[in-house]
Image (cartoon, coloured by chain):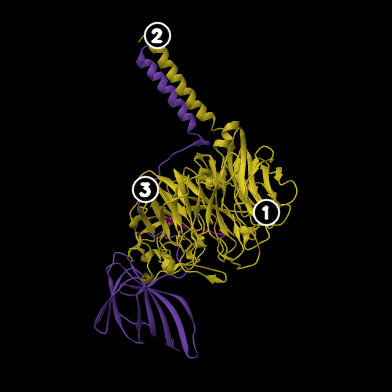
Chain colours: A purple, B yellow
Amino acid sequence: MSFSRLATLGLYLLLLALAACKQPGTISLEKTRPLPESVPGTGNFSSEPAKPYSQSSPNLFARVVFEADGPPGYRVEVRDLMIPPKKKAADVKLPGAAFLEVRYGAALLTLDGRQQQLAMGNTLAISQGQAFTVESTSNESLTIRAQIVRAQ
Amino acid sequence: MNRRTLTLVLAAFAFLFLLAMAACTGCNGCTSCNLTVAWPTWRGSTARSGIQLFETTLGDPNAVSTLHTVWTFTLPSAGGFHSSPVVAGGRVYIGGGNGIFYCLDGNDGHKIWQYPASGTLTQQFLSNPSSMGIASSAAIAQIGNETAVIFGAPDPTYPGGSGLGDGHLFALKASDGSLIWESPAVALLTGTTGSSTTEFHQQIGYSAPLVFNDHVYIGIADHGDDPIQQGKVISVRLSNGTIDTGFNFVATGTRGGGIWGSAAAWEDIFVTTGNSKCWNGGCQSEPSPNHGLSMLRLNKDTGNVIWKQQPVPFSLDNDPDWAAGPAVMFAADCGPALISTQKDGWTWAVQAGPATPGAPSVMWSFPPGPWTTNGFTPADGTYHGDDDYKRPGATWGDVYIGVMGGYDTVTSLGSGQTRLHALNVCGPDNQRVRWIKDIPGAAGGWTYPLGPPTVTPSGMIFVGTSQGHIVAIADPQLHPSLGNRCEDPAIPAANCVALGHRLVPDPWIHDVTLPGSPNDGVFGEPAIANGNLYVATVDGNVYMLHP
């Protein structure tokens, strides 16, 4: 028997044995593959949040996460604001006096003509009726938590 | 080709062929194979990766759709199960909250033996389920010629002990449950006065023994922070159970840094540690050293700290114990990694090697942020408390699957507890999320809505829930997903891209309701062995499920 024939036979037997191993009950080292990117606009949205953000003005999305009566004559509300990366939301008005806290991302906030850079953890007080402009300055969406007190 | 060469070539091929056939038959039901397809320890391996490397029909969505309960074993007395089953040699081994360790027949669930034959392994300080009987999952090991099962438990009858239930390690013969050795006390319980700072309130709790080389390592924590104890890892010799005093790791100089989870191994020992600031009834200034709230690499022989990742500084310690324990991942594209989720919901990945002293090489945090390398700061507005993210995740190729806070953790601290995230470990931050799944039958509350997930080689994930469900989730590589959703679960899919996020798949699932649902929850992990699932419940049932 020539070497090449012998080698072919040997390889065949090996492949046969390994193929037999590829049945249930055998070890498998399948590599995880990246999943294809989901295409926006195709619908088929299968799961939605219980308290979703909704768009309230250009580049501004908001959701109410808590709402209750406060001291007599007042109502308290916790609202999350979200601004897309590198986008600006102008003339934002909240329904009362508010305490803002940056929860994620970075912001440039303009209030009464003055600009302030805000990073995660920074806070700011807003008077009732005061309008402001906020810009997301990072590559991530900006999340601001607003704790609002308003007269009923 | 001469005769001698021909003979050598033939012999080589014959050897390779026999090797391949042996590997093959070894996976298909012979006696020795039962060990190789077993689930011999917590998370399935010393890497704590939560993966069963042998494929069975549990990786087939069609077969999984027929999963049903084949047998049930019920504890004869109260206590439930807060440990998880391990499986080897066709037998199931598990310790009960009633203080009795059981060996069950894997085929029909009947009891083969119990330990002890009479009496119970219990303790006098009852704080939470970690202190009820045996909460530590077991490990199968070889001691000489004997297959042994090793677990941690309190022993109120140990000669010279406190009589209150100091923690010990036990090694039993897997064949008949007879004692091979019992270690000296590794966790001291010298009193039962809550908040006492003069008594020892140490316990093994949920920590499962790690059998690595010729030693057994066990983590020590406390009784419900009442008060926190000096966390430590004890190493005992596998051969005889004596404590190896050459290994010494204590997490802090005073108290704190409890090892609530289980150590993992790869070249060295990896652990995560608990809080070190406050406890029921008191607080302390920062201890020195302070290895609390850290993921650490320890020298396997000495216990010396090689490096630690401590993202939450002492000043921000509001009890975000790092209780999940680490998982070692052998990612093909980014090397051995160590991954775990801290109790505040943040997930961290660091390079597992090399064993160079100093700062670890941080790969990423999730969610991402500028604090990845240097940890959090008091000014960054993040909160780090007891948000109940305590479960280890599973590793599958380059994917990590676990319970974590996700993007939403910065605004809704607890919203991720009923959800699984799958993360692309080797990808960039903006492609970290592979998929997200909200799991049915997982109620919120103080306890653990989801157990630790386990996974098959093909990407079928199993997880138990607090309402007594076993849920199978198919990675979209295995089965088409149900649709899309936003990677930030708080954002509606329609607004996802506009807000700078990606749409990710919402995977296919199959939901199995166990007979005791909704009150009989699953606390531990589904063990995947021999084509079956083995799960234990808080009302004291062990179930075997089969397609």
Residue B215 quadrant: top right
Q: Earlier in the sequence, mark 1 or mark 2?
A: 2
The structure residue drawn at horizontal position 46% and vertical position 52%, both measured from the top left corner, is B401
Residue A90 quadrant: bottom left
Q: Residue furthest top?
A: B3
Q: Which residue is mark 2?
A: B3
Residue B299 visible here: yes
- Name the subunit of mark 2: B
- Name the subunit of mark 1: B
Q: Position of residue B209 (x, y in %)?
A: 56, 48
Q: Are marks 1 and 2 on the same chain?
A: yes
B438 inside magenta stretch? yes
Q: Which residue is mark 3?
A: B356
The structure residue drawn at horizontal position 36% and vertical position 58%, both measured from the top left corner, is A42
Q: Distance between the Cα atoms at labels 2 and 3?
A: 54 Å
Quadrant of the rendering where the C terminus of chain B is positioned: top right
Q: Which mark is residue B125?
A: none
Q: Secondary structure at mark 3?
A: loop
Q: In the image, which residues are magenta?
A: B435-441
Given residues B144 and B365, the one toward you in this image is B144
Given residues B168 and B536, the one toward you in this image is B168
Q: Earlier in the sequence, mark 2 or mark 3?
A: 2
Q: Earlier in the sequence, mark 3 or mark 1?
A: 1
Q: Secondary structure at mark 1?
A: loop
Type of residue at label 3? Thr
Q: Position of residue A118 (x, y in %)?
A: 30, 74
Vertical order, A30 against B420 (above or below): above
Q: Which residue is mark 1?
A: B161
